[in-house]
Image: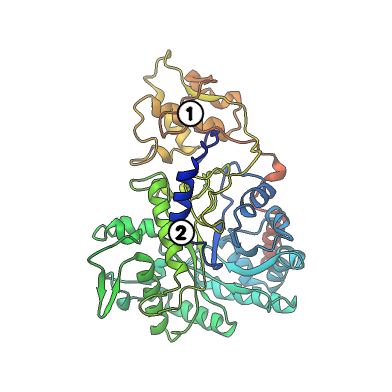
Amino acid sequence: MLSRRRSSPRPLVPGLLLLLLAMAPPPPASAVGVNWGFASSHSLPAAQVVRGLLLPNSVPRVRLAAASSDALTALEGTGIAVSVGIPDALLRPLASSTKAAAAWVHDNITRYSSSVRFEYIVVGDEPFLLRHGQNFHPFVVRAAENVQQALVHAKLSGKMKVVVPCSADTFQNASTLPTKASFRPDVNKTMADLLSFLANSSSPFMVELDPFLSFQHNRNLSLDYFLFQLMSHPVKDGENKYDNYVDASIDALVTSLTKAGFSDMDIIVGRAGWPTDGAMNATPAIAQSFMTGLVNHLAKKSGTPLRPKVPPVEMYLFSLLDEDQRSIASGGYERHHGIFTFDGQAKYYANIGQGPKSLKNAPDVNYLPSKWCVVDNNKDLSNVSSSFSSACANGDCTSLLPGGSCSGLAWPGNVSYAFNNYYQQHDQSEDSCYFNGLGLITTVDPSVDNCLFPLTIHVSSATSLHLTLPVSLLLVLWFCIVCI
């Protein structure tokens, strides 16, 4: 989601500040990290994210959604532990060619290995997600093996591990009881190969948790259960009791691993977060409750009923920044998981490494001029619906969805929101506010209460964090190999 420029918060009076500091949670365990994704129409420069957000907020580790030369260059010499993702689109070429895997490792790992503290290479983006079917099953393990082999040849295998992020629906559970869980039948063969690979390379199992999606699909479980605030009526599974979703999910995975013969495999949670917009119960206040409960729970190192005093090796919060280009197959809320807005402004308090201190916002953000596009109320709006649909189809109207921050806008205010979002995503070009003559450019901020009308940032082609040249060349290399 885009956001308008915001004024600095008012300073707290000393007494209130001391009270908040006393009530604040302890710093997170060093095992906490954040996800940094690049699916945004307008991204802050990587150097600004690192120097303006990660370092000032003492973030100890970061997981990149994909290899970005800008991001990796910005992370050089910082000491931040870095995990690098490989998109699903590259699984087939990496599985088909050891040369392609070697090229990827050379371009994205070896080049930076002397100055970046790599921790994991994350192969795929939830390749076993149920809605993907078996599209990626034939390629996942071979791709991971080829990347591992490339690391060995580069003499880097001792410095980082290769993992595969598995969505929570990779293991199934007809009930909410962890001991009834098991891996889905359609992934059993591939999962057996993956678990053997992970065990042989001493790599952990990475699971991706989506508590908000689970909350939506399990309305028999209270919101308190997901926010670590359940005071009574825990979920009982034999002698074990579960008062939160995260422990139950981890133990469902533990059960699945045990049934597959890998009961002692380490676990990493590669994703856990809560959205702030785009759906009912997706608000900054609820997101803060979830994040606070999650980090505090992890800091206790109490583990789970099936693994007492053995918490996940690491936990990556989802996510650092909002991403207005993310898929909304699961729901419009997917674009609003950021602890920070797309322009680096904190939406709520979360302890991502800085302890009880307030989060530091990105400084010196380069905004476009204070101009917005709204519907011209002096025009005949009887045919405005087609322009509204077009603006939403090519922009981001997820804040207008039921429960969203702008869902209360009446007609034609919702049309103005759609027009403006499209206008901002197209860098405020004059023709992007035409809409068959129904658009009007204004310098008066049309935001209403908590519904913020976007004001975007200046982005040059040099700061783009999308598909990098090495990845493009890798796809070409694979195509040539296949055609020979």
Question: Looking at the image, is 398 positioned above or below residue 440?
Answer: below
Quarter of the image with the C terminus in it? bottom right
**Of the pair 426 and 248, the residue shown nearer to us:** 248
Could you say where residue 155 lies in the image, as x and y percent from the top left?
74, 78
Residue 84 seen from this side: yes
Q: Is residue 92 above or below residue 213?
A: below
The image quadrant of residue 75 is bottom right
Report which residue position mark 2 lands on: 25
Picture quarter containing residue 388?
top left
Q: Which quadrant of the structure image shows residue 167?
A: bottom left
Q: Residue at x 71, y 55 (%)?
A: 69
- SS for tag 2? loop
Q: Judge the density around disc 1: few (<14), some (14-19), many (≥20) Cα neighbours within 10 Å.
A: many
The location of residue 103, given as percent across then percent down, is 73, 67
Looking at numbered disc 1 in the image, what kind of residue is underneath it?
Phe
Query: Front-most of 41 and 275?
Result: 275
Question: Which mark, residue 318?
Answer: none
Checking the image for residue 419, the label placed there is 1
Percent coordinates x, y for residue 258 in the rendering? 40, 84
Q: Amino acid at mark 2?
A: Pro
Is 73 situated left or right of 142 in this image? right
| Relative to 335, residue 252 above or below | below
**Distance from Cα at disc 2 to Cα at disc 1:** 42 Å
Identify the residue at horizontal 69%, vertical 67% (top origin). Answer: 117
Using the image as rendered, state which of residue 45 and residue 16 is in the foreground: 16
Query: How many numbered marks, from 0 up?
Result: 2
Q: Residues within 10 Å of mark 2 (few under 14, many from 20)?
A: some
Q: Is residue 339 left or right of residue 82?
A: left
